[in-house]
Amino acid sequence: TVGLGFAVKSWIAGVSQSLGRDCPRPTLENGYFTPDESTYKHDDKIYYACNQGQKPISEGWWANVVCNDGKWSPYPLCIENDCIAPNVPHAKLINPVQEGWYGNGNSAGFVCERGYEIITDSSTSCQNGRWTSLPTCTRKPFSCGSPPQVENAIIQQKYEDIYEEYSTVAYACGDLYQLEGQSVVQCKNAQWQVAPKCGECGDPPTIVYGDTTKTERLSITYECSRFYKLQGPSQVMCLSGRQWSKLPTCVCECAHFLLFLCVCSNILYYESSMDICFSANFCKLEGKIDHLKTLQSALFFEEETTEYFDCEDVRYNEYKWVAGNWKHYGAIGRCIKGNVYFKGCKSSTGFIIKHK
């Protein structure tokens, strides 16, 4: 039983050792390694060095590689004693080489980023593939970190991690927001001055018979509906107190004419009164007109034009083919010299709204 157990252990060990393949002797130009054998077992490690003027591809004067299932990892290689461009935190190279490599004996100079200063020598030298001591950039005293965030505002300068003392940044508010306080703040004694705020004026106010046509930062432009004229400034500003400046108004273009009290009559001698803005170019109807369905908004007629209306009594309304389209109406109105002549609803003779 003991012999059988020993045989099993030996067989398992043999299988285990055969899982990794042997590696051939590596080829190494301008270098040498130890131990120097013709073949190496799996997991064997060898050390190598390079001739004068050369160095291992890894850091240091000696390097090691491992046989891994028939291949060397990493493969040994000797390169010239050049140095790759050094990296110094918070510093930039002065006149960096395009190739990214510095020859043996060459120097590299640094300048610290804004807000940092060099404590040691500002340059370093490539010696046999290694840099001599690198400089150190430390944060300047009394410098500031990131400037304070302001809701609904942006900083107009490029972002930086560190700002030197007496550095400044400028804030700008978003559209429809007004700056409250100083737009420019300064770093002083390691602290930022009090940042501004961006106040909101709120939604653009509405005006009767008008609408907004242009919305810009801190301003809104208005225009009036057809037949109305703008009185006051067309542009309204968002003021520092989060208030809009004075709004314009929209008035009837014929406001400089007389406002006539007109009589609506028909053949049954039914009378009622309403206001009509009269001019030689158009007529205006508004509100409730006898026999007609109530108008939801003011309606304008240009001279010698016709409009179609629904009658209050729905029995008179119907669809008719008019100028290539179906129209639903029961009365027709025509503007003639400021008077609106109607036909329909109660009589084929019609009725008239006219000025006295």
Image (spheres, grey):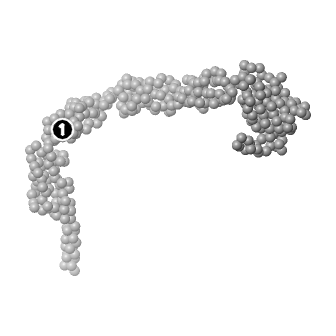
Determine the residue positioned at 21% across, 39% down.
Answer: 99
Disc 1 is placed on an element classified as strand
Residue 139 placed where, x, y %?
A: 31, 31
Q: In this view, does 267 lie to the left or right of 252?
A: right
Q: What's the residue type where badge 1 is placed?
A: Tyr
Q: In this view, does 98 lie above or below 252?
A: below
Determine the residue positioned at 56% across, 30% down.
Answer: 215
Q: Looking at this view, is 272 or 338 the one in front?
A: 338
* Figure quadrant of residue 240: top right
User: The N terminus appears in which quarter of the rendering?
Assistant: bottom left
Q: In this view, does 309 lie above or below 253?
A: below
Q: In this view, does 136 lie to the left or right of 154?
A: left
Residue 129 placed where, x, y %?
A: 16, 41
Reading the image, the residue beneath label 1 is 102
User: The C terminus appears in which quarter of the rendering?
Assistant: top right
Q: How crowded is mark 1: few (under 14 residues within 10 Å), some or many (20 or more)?
A: many
Q: Is residue 32 above or below residue 24?
A: above
Determine the residue positioned at 20% across, 74% down.
Answer: 11
Residue 338 placed where, x, y %?
A: 77, 26
Most distant residue in the front direction: 323
Most distant residue in the bottom direction: 1
Image label count: 1
Q: Is residue 13 left or right of residue 348?
A: left
| Residue 177 visible in the current orientation | no
Q: Looking at this view, is 28 or 223 the one in front?
A: 223
Q: Looking at this view, is 334 or 235 the one in front?
A: 334
Residue 279 placed where, x, y %?
A: 74, 23
Determine the residue positioned at 22% across, 30% down.
Answer: 122
| Residue 248 visible in the current orientation | yes
Q: Is residue 94 left or right of residue 178?
A: left
